């Protein structure tokens, strides 16, 4: 018989993807912020090169996480959650996936329209997508990318607040569901 606590906890693979992607997203946000405050163009471009490569890494990890999720469904939501909390949780997760996939693809598209390839940490080059060059549209997409990245950070804050609420106020083991220890 499977322990009830195990049934309420996410799988080890889901935990791995969750935390690696979370750290990568926050790191990538900091890279973008640092690039905007770089001393000169060369430093800014070097930081943005890492930002782009990490963005592609996040895309690959997110697709792998979705593939994992197909074979390893999420545990049921804790009993006693209000309908609005369940709806907000589901909506937040869908928006996360849209952003985790859309931000890197949008940036790759914008780079392609700007005639740039993506250097993947000096290991190899990711070629531009087969689209025509359009600097104006590339800049528009980069602007949307920046706005959506800011939305991602706010969404992360909401997600953290929800996890803390469920853990410390509701006593539903919110954080423990995504950690290999503690009572879920």
Image: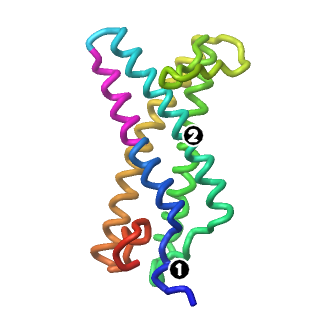
SS of the residue under disc 1? helix
Picture coordinates of residue 45, whole percent (x, y): 41, 15
Image quarter in which the N terminus is found = bottom right
Mark 1 touches mark 2? (CB < 8 Å): no
Graded by Cα atoms within 10 Å as few (under 14), some (14 to 19) or many (20 or more), the crowding at tag 2 reads many
Q: Secondary structure at mark 2?
A: helix
Across and down, in percent, residue 29 comes to 38, 35
Indicate left or right for 57 with 39 as reference.
Answer: right
The answer to whether 116 is drawn above or below residue 9 in the figure is above
Which colouring convention does the figure follow? rainbow
- Please rate how many residues cluster around mark 1, counting C-alpha atoms within 10 Å: few if below 14, some from 14 to 19, many from 20: some
Which residue is depicted at the point 55% across and 76% down? 76
**Percent coordinates x, y for residue 176 in the rendering:** 38, 71
Task: Tell me which residue sits at (62%, 68%) in the image.
Answer: 73
What residue occupies the far bottom of the structure in this picture? 1
Which of the pair 105/12 is nearer the observer?
Answer: 12
63 displayed left or right of 143: right
**Magenta highlight range:** 25-38
Q: Quadrant of residue 177?
A: bottom left
Identify the image quadrant of the C terminus: bottom left
Q: Nearer the viewer, residue 154 or 172?
A: 172
Q: Earlier in the sequence, mark 1 or mark 2?
A: 1
Tell me the residue that label 2 is attached to. Answer: 59
Q: Is residue 60 above or below residue 9?
A: above
Alpha carbon of mark 1 to alpha carbon of mark 2: how far?
Answer: 28 Å
Magenta residues, dominant SS class: helix
Q: Which residue is mark 1?
A: 7
Q: Residue reaching furthest front?
A: 123
Which residue appears at 38% of the width and 28% of the height? Answer: 32
- The x, y position of residue 28, in whole percent, is 40, 35
Q: Is residue 156 magenta?
A: no
């Amino acid at each position: 018989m499977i322990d009830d606590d195990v049934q309420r906890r996410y799988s080890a693979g889901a935990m791995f993807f969750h935390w690696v992607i979370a750290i990568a997203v926050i790191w990538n946000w900091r890279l973008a912020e640092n690039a905007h405050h770089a001393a000169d163009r060369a430093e800014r471009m070097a930081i943005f090169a890492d930002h782009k490569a990490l963005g592609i890494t996040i895309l690959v990890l997110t697709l792998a996480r979705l593939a994992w999720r197909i074979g390893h469904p999420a545990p049921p939501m804790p009993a006693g959650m209000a309908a609005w909390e369940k709806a907000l949780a589901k909506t937040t997760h869908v928006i996360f996936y849209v952003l985790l996939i859309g931000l890197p693809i949008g940036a790759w598209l914008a780079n392609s329209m700007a005639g740039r390839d993506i250097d993947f940490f000096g290991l190899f080059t990711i070629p531009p997508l087969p689209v025509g060059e359009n600097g104006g549209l590339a800049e528009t997409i980069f602007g949307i990318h920046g706005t959506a990245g800011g939305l991602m950070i706010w969404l992360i804050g909401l997600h953290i607040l929800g996890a803390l609420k469920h853990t410390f106020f509701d006593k539903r083991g919110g954080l423990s569901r995504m950690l290999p220890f503690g009572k879920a």
